[in-house]
Amino acid sequence: MSPRHVRAALLLILIGFPVFAADKPKAVSGKVVDVTDGDTLTFLDAGKVRHKVRLHGIDAPEKGQAFGTKAKQALSDLVFDKEVAVAVTDVDRYERLVGRVTEGDTDVNTALVRGGHAWRYPQYDKTGDFTAAQDEARAAKKGLWADTDPAAPWEFRRKK
């Protein structure tokens, strides 16, 4: 096991997530204190421990990419300074929690895609949870879909 994987396993154990869990993902919650970009946030749990979270199954435009600033603002509007719950699905290579985020009754991941502030990320959205939301946003030309030829963030990163 690489040092990165050991750190990720320890992080999961510390937050109470069984490393080889076959059951439902562990839920963590807290108050959002930072929004890095359109698909990454940081919250403080009840013990004042910081958790960085990458939203599962979606990919928002990058900083410097068309709609990148608007995507960050949309996520901020939904969660900043609010209590969120995160259904953790994974820990990524940057040791961020990856998960579905809810604020009250709002599924934040879906809301961002439905509003045209993020793409469905097919590489990670294997079940197609965000397909209908993306189709709806595209048909209505919401957000990034107002652009005549929007570039997916993974394509934008590859070109850079």
Image (cartoon, grey):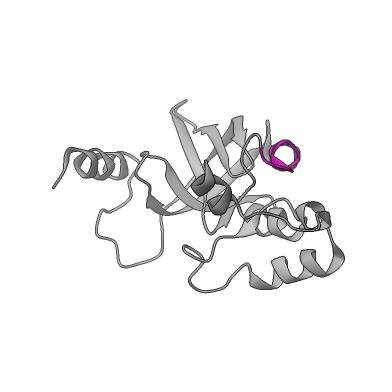
Q: Nearer the viewer, residue 140 or 18?
A: 140
Residue 14: in sight, yes or no?
Answer: yes
Residue 62: x percent and y percent?
61, 41
60 versus 35 height, above or below:
below
- Looking at the image, which residue is at 23% across and 40% down? 4
Image coords of residue 23 (percent x, y): 35, 67
The residue located at (53%, 52%) in the rendering is: 154
Number of callouts: 0
- Magenta region includes residue 22: no
Determine whether 10 is above or below 146 in the image. above
Name the side, left or right, on which 87 lies relative to 21.
Answer: right
Q: Nearer the viewer, residue 151 or 38?
A: 151
* Secondary structure that dominates the magenta span: helix
139 or 100, which is in the foreground? 139
Give yes or no for residue 74 being in the magenta stretch: yes
Residue 122, position as x, y percentages in the image: 53, 66
Residue 11 in picture, x, y percent from top left: 30, 39
Left or right, residue 96 beside residue 131? left
Q: Which residues are magenta?
A: 65-75
Q: Is residue 106 visible?
A: no
**Extreme residue toward the front, this view:** 159
> What residue lies at 78% left-to-right and 69% top-to-bottom?
136
* Residue farthest to the right, as pictured: 140
Residue at the image point whose x is 19% and y is 41% from the top: 6
